[in-house]
Image (tube, rainbow, N blue to C red):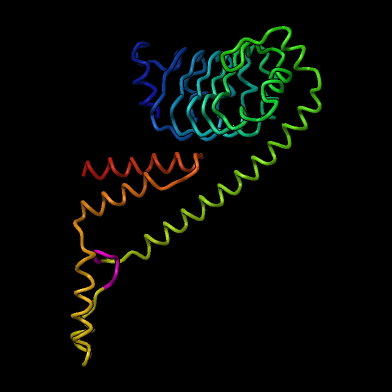
Amino acid sequence: TEDMVRRRAEHNECEIFSLEEVSLHQQDIERIQHLDRWCRDLRILYLQNNLIPRIENLGRLKKLEYLNLALNNIEVIENLEGCESLQKLDLTVNFVGRLSGVESLKRNVHLTELFLVGNPCAEFEGYRQYVVASLPQLKWLDGTEISRSERIRASQGLEEVKRQIWEQEREYLKRRAREKEEAQRKEAGEEKGNKERKPGFDGRWYTDINNTAPGLEENKVNQEVEEKPNTMSPDLDDERREREFWHKPCSFTPESRLEAHRHLEEKRKAKEK
């Protein structure tokens, strides 16, 4: 929001239009917006450790030199062609699996430093060779300087490396599609469960049918006996659900990271009530 940006502009007398540097890290931001209209003079932008899934709305920042998007949910390198002054891009620990997206950075002719460590694509065989060969303007990749000899070697056998990268991309994207489908099924199941949850400590409706129907008094007694061992205080029940949430095995994906964030937000809001 504009208020958030103004709070970060105290050193600039809360004037945002002439800001050259702004830090918006750890603000639970889920989308980049407005900055390219409000802060046209930005040179340094810190957006690390948020929940941003996509690089967008930065193309009009013609003076931007350093963009830090580490620790977000970004999957594709895109929409930075307009940042013609960009020198350093940090995408450490995101979810970039489409390594061919680095080709879009060819237009950023001043880009000398790139960080992709901690992304799925950084595990691809031929990763470094591909990036070095694709971006001749780079001088540093993942904190390691690119020597002249490495650049020469990177251009050798490049077509075969490209083929390997594309194959690995395809396999990764298939896996991501399955992960997204699984996340959608899980979300749909949880929504259905919430809708079906009814009053009563165990989510069931209780009626007086056992009191009114003849011959069912014994069933009522048996039901009461069965229910007693399952009763637990709300605090213990919450504690059990909390343990289940954090100990349940799951893949490290943008969806699981967002789910964990929203879980913590719900806990925080519940405590504030």
Left of 180 or right of it: where is 2? Answer: left
Outermost residue toward the top in this view:
148
**Which of the pair 163/211 is nearer the observer?**
163
Outermost residue toward the bottom in this view:
214
Q: Quadrant of the N terminus?
A: top left
Choose top left, top right, bottom left or bottom right for residue 190.
bottom left
> Can you give x and y, in whole percent of width and height, for residue 259 in the image?
42, 44
Left of 35 or right of it: where is 110? Answer: right
Residue 202 on the magenta segment: yes
Q: Across the whole image, how many numbered discs are drawn on residues?
A: 0
> Can you give x and y, in whole percent of width and height, for residue 225 in the image?
19, 74
Choose top left, top right, bottom left or bottom right for residue 121.
top right
Left of 29 or right of it: where is 144? Answer: right
Rendered position, 196 above or below 154? below
> Can you give x and y, in whole percent of width and height, for residue 262 in the image?
38, 42
**Which of the pair 265/175 is nearer the observer?**
175
* Most common secondary structure along the magenta stretch: loop
Residue 199 on the magenta segment: no
> Can you give x and y, in whole percent of width and height, for residue 142 in the image?
58, 17
Choose top left, top right, bottom left or bottom right for residue 12.
top left
Left of 68 or right of it: where is 265? Answer: left
Stretch in magenta: 200-205
Q: Residue at x 22, y 41 (%)?
A: 272
Q: Residue at x 28, y 51 (%)?
A: 240
Q: Residue at x 70, y 17 (%)?
A: 132
Q: Residue at x 49, y 39 (%)?
A: 252
Rendered position, 13 above or below 267? above
Q: Quadrant of the C terminus?
A: top left
